C-alpha cells in the first residue's frame, strides 16, 4: 500500500524535474541572438566572457533563467501556503494583495534609488508581510467569510496599486519600469537583485519543508489543531512570514507576476496530492519550470520584440482560473 | 485523574463555569449532560487548557496543567471538538495527524506512526476507507475518522464534544460501544451527550450540569433515582433492567 503511493507520485516528480531542466536549457538556448551549443559549454564551463555570445549568456540569459526558476517556485509555494493558512483555495499572493504590498515597497525603493541588494529584499518582504497580516487578522477579527477575504484582497490591490501609481506619477524616473513591472517581467533581472532573492527563497523553501505537516494540521480547523498540540496563532504567523518572504523576494525581481500562485497549487492538487509534504516541493518544481518556460516563450514568440512574461502567464492563467470557478470546488465543499 | 478544583472559566470577562470541582478517572466512561448553553463544551475546553481559567487549578495525574505546553497536553488528552470540518485529505492522512503531538523536529511521520494509525483505523472500523478522501464518506464514517485520529494520539484521556450528534441510531450505538471498550481498556473517556438514555446506558458516571454548576456526579442509576433529570430537563427518565428510556 505504501509502495503503491510512492510509485504514484514518482512519475509526477520525474515530470516536474524534467520540465524544470527542459525549460532551463531551452531558456539558455533560445532567444533573439543565436547562441550555439559550443558557446554555452564554453561560457559555462570555461567561465569565458570574451565573445558577445558568452556575454549574452552570462549577463542576459542565465540571470533570466535563474530569475524564472526562483520566482516561479517562490510564488507557487507562497500561494500553496497562503491557501492552506487562510483555508481558502481562491487565495494567492496576487489575489489577496500580497504582491501589491511588495510591489508598492519596491516602487518606493525605486523612487529612493534602491534597485537591488538586501535592502530591496527586506522592504519587499515588509510590504508583503504587512499586507498578508492585514488580510489574515482582518479575516479572523471580523469573522470574514472566504468570499469576503477575496474581496478584501481586491480592495487592497486597488488601494496599493493606486498608491504605487501616485508614486510613479510624481517620480518620473520610476515610471519607465512601471508598465512591465505591473504585469511581471524578468528583463530587469540582474545579479544584484537575484542573489539576495535566491538566498531568501531557497532558505524559505528548505525550512518550509520541515513544517509541512503543521500546515496540514492547521487545515483541520482551529480546535482540532489545538487539540493536536499545535500553537495555532504562532504557527499561522510563522507560515505567513514565509509566504511573505517568498512573495516579496519574487516581486523584488520580477514585479507583479500574477496567477502562478493560484494556478500551480491547484494543478498540483488535482494531478498529484493535497498533502503538503509533497504539495510544497511539487509546487516549487512545477512553478519554476512553468514560469521559465513562459518567459522563454515571451522572448521568442515575437523575437526580437519581447512580451512581458506576465502576459503569457495571464493568457494561460486566466482561463484556468475560470475553470476553477466553474467547477465550483474552489472555496466551498473542499476548502 | 484529570482533575479540576474550584475552577472558574469563560470567554473574555463572561464567567461561564462557576467554581467547579470534579475529577475524571481513568477506566471510566463519564457522560456530561445538561441543557444547551450550560457550559458543557466550556468545561471540556477548560480541562484541555484551551481557554484560560480565571481561578482554580487543573491537573492531569497530579501535574498542574498550566506548567505543560500544548504539545505535552496533547500527548495526554485527545479532544474531539463539536465543529468538525471535512478537510481535503485521505482518511489515512488525517488519522496519521493524530500522531502530530508525538513528532519531534523535523516533524515527519515514521513507519511506526503509520502502524499506530493503521491500528487506530482498525479499532474505529474504517481501515477499508484508508485511501478514500474524507469528504467522500458519510457523516457517520467521518465521525469514526475523527475518533480514529484521537485514538492514534494514544492518550490516557479522550474528551469528546457531542460524539453522537447527527448520527443515525446504529452509528450512535457503534460510537458508544467503541467508547465503552476504550474505557474498559483503561482510558478515561469524557463525552458531552444530548441523548440521555444513550448516555445513561453506556456510562459509568453521569455528570449533570446547569448554569455553569455541577448538580450531580454519580452512577447512572443514582442520577435516575434522584429526580434531577426531571428538575433540569423537564422530562422523566425511567430504568427497566439495563435499559433507560424517556417517559413523557
Image (cartoon, helix red, strand yellow):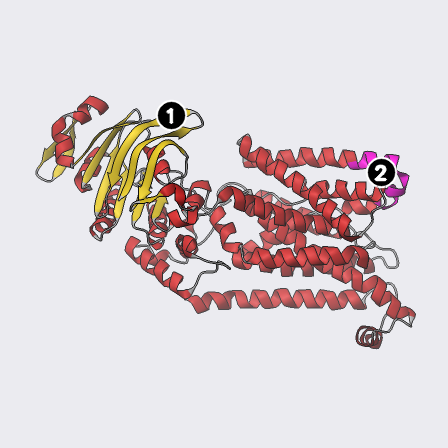
In the rendered view, tell whether residue A25 sits above or below residue B70.
below
| Residue at mark 1 shares a chain with residue at mark 2 | no
B3 or B111: which is nearer to us?
Answer: B3
Q: Which mark is residue A168?
A: 2
The extreme left residue here reads B241
Q: Main secondary structure of the magenta part?
A: helix
The residue at which mark 1 appears reads as B15
Percent coordinates x, y for residue B106 in the rendering: 51, 59
The magenta region covers A164-177
SS at circle 2: helix
The image quadrant that residue B163 belongs to is top left
Q: Nearer the viewer, mark 1 or mark 2?
A: 1
- Mark 1–mark 2 Cα distance, whole angstroms, equals 55 Å
Taking A330 as reference, is A321 left or right? right
The answer to if B240 sits in the magenta stretch is no
Q: Chain of mark 2?
A: A
In the rendered view, tell whether residue B206 sits above or below residue A54.
above
Taking B183 as reference, is B238 left or right? left
In the rendered view, tell whether residue A20 sits above or below residue A92.
below
The image quadrant that residue A153 belongs to is top right
Taking A8 as reference, is A176 left or right? right
Q: Which residue is at a point 53% across and 46% down the rendered structure image?
A: A235
A249 or A9: which is nearer to us?
Answer: A249
Taking A128 as reference, is A184 left or right? right
Q: Which residue is at a point 12% across and 35% down the rendered structure image?
A: B221
SS at circle 1: strand
Q: Residues within 10 Å of mark 1 (few under 14, many from 20)?
A: some
A204 or A97: which is nearer to us?
Answer: A204
Amino acid at each position: 500500500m505504501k509502495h503503491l503511493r510512492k510509485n504514484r507520485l514518482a512519475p509526477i516528480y520525474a515530470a516536474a524535474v524534467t520540465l524544470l531542466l527542459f525549460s532551463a536549457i531551452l531558456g539558455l538556448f533560445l532567444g533573439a541572438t543565436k547562441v550555439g551549443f559550443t558557446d554555452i559549454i564554453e561560457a559555462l564551463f570555461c567561465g569565458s566572457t570574451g565573445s558577445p555570445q558568452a556575454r549574452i549568456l552570462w549577463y542576459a540569459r542565465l540571470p533570466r533563467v535563474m530569475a524564472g526558476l526562483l520566482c516561479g517556485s517562490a510564488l507557487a509555494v507562497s500561494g500553496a501556503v497562503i491557501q492552506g493558512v487562510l483555508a481558502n483555495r481562491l487565495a494567492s499572493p496576487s489575489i489577496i494583495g500580497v504582491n501589491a504590498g511588495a510591489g508598492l515597497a519596491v516602487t518606493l525603493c525605486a523612487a529612493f534609488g534602491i534597485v537591488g541588494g538586501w535592502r530591496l529584499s527586506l522592504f519587499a518582504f515588509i510590504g508583503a508581510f504587512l499586507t498578508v497580516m492585514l488580510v489574515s487578522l482582518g479575516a479572523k477579527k471580523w469573522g470574514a467569510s472566504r468570499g469576503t477575504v477575496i474581496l478584501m484582497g481586491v480592495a487592497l490591490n486597488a488601494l496599493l496599486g493606486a498608491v504605487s501609481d501616485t508614486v510613479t506619477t510624481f517620480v518620473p524616473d520610476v515610471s519607465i519600469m512601471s508598465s512591465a513591472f505591473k504585469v511581471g517581467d524578468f528583463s530587469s533581472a540582474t545579479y544584484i537583485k537575484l542573489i539576495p532573492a535566491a538566498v531568501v527563497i531557497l532558505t524559505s523553501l528548505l525550512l518550509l519543508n520541515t513544517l509541512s505537516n503543521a500546515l496540514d494540521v492547521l487545515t483541520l480547523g482551529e480546535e482540532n489543531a489545538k487539540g493536536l498540540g499545535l500553537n495555532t496563532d504562532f504557527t499561522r504567523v510563522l507560515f505567513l512570514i514565509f509566504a511573505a518572504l517568498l512573495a516579496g523576494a519574487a516581486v523584488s525581481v520580477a514585479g507583479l507576476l500574477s496567477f502562478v500562485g493560484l494556478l500551480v497549487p491547484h494543478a498540483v492538487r488535482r494531478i498529484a496530492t493535497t498533502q503538503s509534504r509533497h504539495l510544497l516541493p511539487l509546487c516549487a518544481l512545477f512553478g519554476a519550470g512553468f514560469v521559465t518556460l513562459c518567459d522563454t516563450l515571451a522572448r521568442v514568440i515575437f523575437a526580437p520584440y519581447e512580451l512581458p512574461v506576465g502576459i503569457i502567464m495571464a493568457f494561460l492563467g486566466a482561463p484556468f482560473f475560470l475553470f476553477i470557478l466553474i467547477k465550483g470546488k474552489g472555496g466551498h465543499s473542499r476548502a | 485523574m484529570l482533575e479540576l478544583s474550584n475552577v472558574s472559566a469563560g470567554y473574555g470577562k463572561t464567567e461561564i463555569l462557576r467554581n467547579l470541582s470534579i475529577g475524571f478517572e481513568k477506566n471510566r466512561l463519564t457522560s456530561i449532560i445538561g441543557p444547551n448553553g450550560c457550559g458543557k463544551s466550556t468545561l471540556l475546553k477548560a480541562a484541555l487548557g484551551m481557554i484560560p481559567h480565571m481561578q482554580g487549578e487543573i491537573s492531569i495525574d497530579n501535574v498542574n496543567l498550566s506548567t505543560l505546553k500544548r504539545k505535552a497536553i496533547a500527548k495526554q488528552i485527545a479532544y474531539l471538538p463539536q465543529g468538525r470540518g471535512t478537510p481535503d485529505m485521505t482518511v489515512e492522512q488525517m488519522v496519521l495527524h493524530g500522531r502530530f503531538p508525538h513528532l519531534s523536529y523535523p516533524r515527519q511521520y515514521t513507519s511506526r506512526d503509520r502502524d499506530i494509525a493503521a491500528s487506530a483505523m482498525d479499532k474505529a472500523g474504517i481501515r477499508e476507507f484508508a485511501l478514500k478522501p474524507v469528504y467522500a464518506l458519510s457523516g457517520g464514517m467521518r465521525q469514526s475518522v475523527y475518533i480514529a485520529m484521537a485514538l492514534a494520539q494514544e492518550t490516557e484521556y479522550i474528551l469528546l464534544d457531542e460524539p453522537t450528534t447527527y448520527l443515525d441510531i446504529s452509528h450512535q450505538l457503534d460510537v458508544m460501544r467503541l467508547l465503552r471498550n476504550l474505557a474498559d481498556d483503561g482510558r478515561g473517556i469524557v463525552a458531552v451527550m444530548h441523548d440521555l438514555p444513550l448516555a445513561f446506558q453506556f456510562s459509568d458516571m453521569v455528570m449533570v450540569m446547569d448554569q455553569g454548576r455541577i448538580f450531580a456526579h454519580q452512577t447512572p442509576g443514582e442520577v435516575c433515582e434522584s429526580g434531577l433529570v426531571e428538575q433540569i430537563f423537564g422530562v422523566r427518565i425511567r430504568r427497566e433492567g439495563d435499559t433507560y428510556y424517556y417517559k413523557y
